[in-house]
Amino acid sequence: MESSQQRCRVVPERSNARTGMESAQDATTEIGRRLRDLRRERGLKQSDLAGEGMSVSYLSLLESGKRPVTPVILRRLAGVLGCTVEYLRTGEHSDRESERQRELLLQLTVAELALRDGQYPAALAGCDQVLAEQPTAAAGTVRRARLARADALEQLGRPAEALADLHALAREQGPGPGSTQWLQVEAARCRCHLLAGEPTSAVTVGAAALAALDGVFEATVTEDHLGLGVALIEAYRRAGLAAPARELADRLLPWAAPAPEPAARAAAFRAAGRRAQLAGDTALALTLNERALALPLADELGRRLGLLRAGYGALLLDEAVPEPALAKEYLRPATRQLAGLDLAACELNLARAELMLDQVEAGITHAQRALALAGDGPSGIALWAWLQLGEARRLAGRPAEAAEALRRVEWLLESGEHGLASGRDLAETWRALGDVWLGQGSPDSAMNAYRQGLAAAGLAGAAPLPAVLHPAAS
């Protein structure tokens, strides 16, 4: 008969065995969770990982922790997901891997600084190097690199490539409305659709993003509304939707004059954070509270306010009955808040306003400033500045100088060195050139420009556009 002492020895042995089984099950569950999280961070489906003896159903069992992972499968998954086997097993990186990740992050920050300094080819090359690294960089680093890469591509006039990255970022389960990164992605998508000559798509993307922002902040207008709104106003304008453009500008302008103090700006994020916390959305609440802590961002806010004022001024010039004097009241202050191509576009609209007011010499001055700011690279701003300068010189009674500017426009359009998307924007520019040539008394040159415009977009008829130019692209 078994003694009580023997029975006492058996009980802990069973307990130890059970503890070991539970520990193994916990490890399997954690490995599965890391597999699932990494796959989602990489924007992959289960079918993307399947193959080589591993079905989708088997992968589903692994991710749910219902099946242990063999060493062979673990190595294969680590390779596909761009991580180490050690990370999948333990959730921790080795010292060597941690150092590698820090080096990749450093490389990315160097590329981001190049982007800020206007060194776009160097920024693009740096981002591409980070993204090409195997095993891949950490998910947060990869997302930042893709966003910076899209920004560089946008600045280099390659919107289709930028949109490929931006759409992929938008599809990922990344930070949502209220986060800086979400705002950057959505505003960039709107701008790049415009740059690609797709104003309708820009409106669709921008309006949906604005609705998402309103869902987070309710009726409160924040600087995020401003950052997205300036792009959406331009999208409405370019799509010929004057009413919603004016409505949105009227909604945002009271927030900008005077600009709210940092404490008031932070209060909107804190209030939205409290609502998110009460709703049980801890991640969103944390994001919004961190935004409140990060304020003020005076430089970027100033740029957004400048873009809003400049955009509103342009809308006033586009009205059926233009208001150039009122437009100047918005455009002039904007010049103190903008730089680079943003300032060039503002100067170009000031030139338009001055010509509408018969201030021809002032119009010439602003057009020349726009040209100087646009620089030597291909851009729609430079093209329209040459056109505006040609029109202003014609009105000033300087036909030879006007013809020189118009021939420059012809050369840029024919050589492809213009930065405009094909289609509507290109056709509108050719059409405007024809109008100015016609006013110059050069019907043959005008007819050639009209034919080129028709070829670019299949427009019917060749009646002149309004005499005062309306820039299509910035």
Image (cartoon, helix red, strand yellow):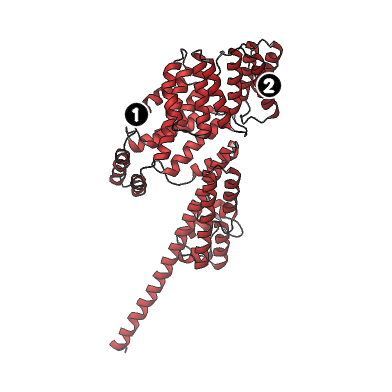
Q: Which residue is mark 2?
A: 407
Left or right of 123, for residue 62: left
Nearer-the-camera pick, 240 or 13:
240
Q: Secondary structure at mark 2?
A: helix
- Amino acid marked by disc 2: Arg
Between the residue at mark 1 and the residue at mark 2, the CA separation in whole angstroms equals 42 Å
Q: Position of residue 334 (x, y in %)?
A: 44, 28
* Quarter of the image that includes the C terminus: top right
Q: Position of residue 300 (x, y in %)?
A: 43, 39
| Marked residue nearer the N-terminal end (1 or 2) | 1
User: Where residue 257 is drawn, which disc sits there?
Assistant: 1
Nearer-the-camera pick, 77 or 70:
77
User: Where residue 38 is drawn, which disc sits there?
Assistant: none
Q: Position of residue 225 (x, y in %)?
A: 39, 34
Residue drawn at x 37%, y 27% as measured from the top left: 253
Q: Are marks 1 and 2 in contact (CB under 8 Å)?
A: no
Q: Can you see residue 471? A: no
Q: Position of residue 422 (x, y in %)?
A: 63, 28
Tag 1: Cα neighbours inside 10 Å, few (<14), some, or many (≥20)? few
Q: Can you see residue 194? A: yes
Residue drawn at x 43%, y 16% as measured from the top left: 325
Residue drawn at x 59%, y 20% as measured from the top left: 389
Left or right of 134, for residue 219: left
Where 231 falls versus 365 (above or below)? below
Q: Secondary structure at mark 1?
A: loop
Tag 2: Cα neighbours inside 10 Å, few (<14), some, or many (≥20)? some
- Amino acid marked by disc 1: Ala
Nearer-the-camera pick, 408 or 222:
408
Q: How many marks?
A: 2
Left or right of 326, for residue 86: right
* Quarter of the image that includes the N terminus: bottom left
